[in-house]
Amino acid sequence: MGMRVTTASVADESVADDEKAGFRSGAVSRTPVPVEVRPLTGRPFHGLVESHRLGYVRISTLKADAARFSRTAALIAREPLGEPQVGVGVQVSGRAVLEQDGRRAEVPPGGLALYDTARPYDVDCPERFRTHLFHLPRRLLGVPERDVRHASATAVGPEEGCGPVLLPFLGLLAASAHSYPAPVGDRLAGSVADLFSALIAQLCLARAAHEPGTSNEHLVHRVREYIGRHLGDPELSPERIARAHHISVRYLHRLFEGEGVTVSRLIQRLRLDACARELARRGRTAPTVSAVAQRWGFADPAHFSRAFRAAYGVPPSEWRSLRNDDAGRSGRQPFEER
């Protein structure tokens, strides 16, 4: 069931200013988390809140004049039994500046930012604006609290990271949330939780990459493990690896600048090594060269043959005939890195 609250009911001049101020805060406080509202203009303040529930996700659309919204420690203390929520604000129009944990995120129209309702934050909207607010229980995201802290107060633009996928989806969801029956809403809420978890992972990685002294060795290790697990998939590519780790392709290539090998070359080298090992094995039912190539991700036999010869100096069929079980210990090693 939806909810709609507007300040229009207190626009009458006969209503006292303190009553208007109370209603302003009350209207916005009827979104999932209470906040204090302070108008930034000398004119009468106008605002509208529409809210709908989609499973365990509360979706609110807030339209208002320029104002500062504060989630204070005092407001948080009044809710000792309240469940911590993670919020994502999608800025439809107007600008917003989110501050939390000493960080400041400037959110342009079309962008988004994440925040944690369990800790104080401020949002300044210096002009009339419209924003979609998505709130869901933090525990349902399945991510550590420290990751939520690291990801909060970080803006994502429409062309950054998860932005091209997440922003259109959230915009459509906000516009149609009222129309879904409960079973569909529950499933969509699960999709929102998964996407927010991916967003937090992306923001944590991006922040770690820009913090002085932070090592990227753990991420390089994870990427190498991922490549090893998916080596036989012919669709394995830098683009797919970047998506799986919630980072950009450009950042993925930057990670491997210090590794002495590009990501694409690493994939090919590991595939060729795997093929060489398998072709060197002796057995009564040895697979064909073509079958070995396909098993390790080479969809084009001609490309495989050229790449293998360039690495080992002989065609794969000749490699098989020359090798025995122990020959791999003394044979030529491909792709020597200098």
Image (cartoon, helix red, strand yellow):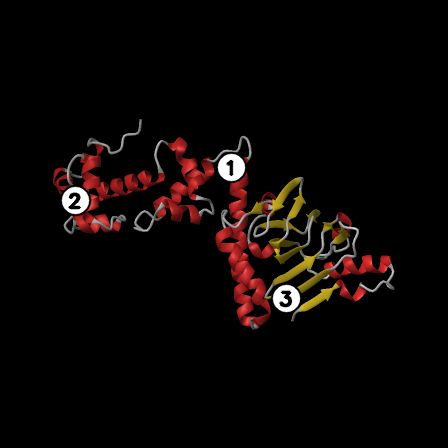
Q: Are marks 3 and 1 in contact (CB under 8 Å)?
A: no
At x 42%, y 46%, the residue is: 242
Give the Cα distance between marks 3 and 2. Answer: 65 Å
Which labelled disc corresponds to residue 141?
none
Residue pointed to by mark 3: 52
Dot 1 amino acid type: Ala
Q: Is residue 190 above or below residue 309?
A: below
* Number of other residues with Cα within 10 Å of mark 1, as a class: few under 14, some 14 to 19, many 20 or more: some
Q: Which residue, as the protein is rendered here, is positioned at the far top?
A: 338
Disc nearest the viewer among 1 and 2:
1
Say if residue 4 shows up in the picture: yes
- The reply to whether dot 1 and dot 2 touch (C-beta < 8 Å) is no
Residue 282 disc label: 2
Q: Which residue is mark 1?
A: 209
Element under disc 3: strand
Closest to the observer, 92 or 139? 92
In terms of sequence position, does the residue under pointer 3 or pointer 2 come before the other? 3
Considering the image in quadrants, where does the N terminus appear?
bottom right
Whether residue 326 is situated above or below residue 230 in the rendered picture: above
In the structure shown, which secondary structural element does the residue marked by tag 2 occupy?
Answer: loop
Q: Nearer the viewer, residue 58 or 143?
A: 58
Give the residue drawn at x 38%, y 32%.
Answer: 259
Location of residue 326 in the rendering, given as x and y in whole percent from the top left corner:
19, 36
Direction from residue 164 to residue 151 in the image, left or right: right
Q: Residue furthest bottom?
A: 181
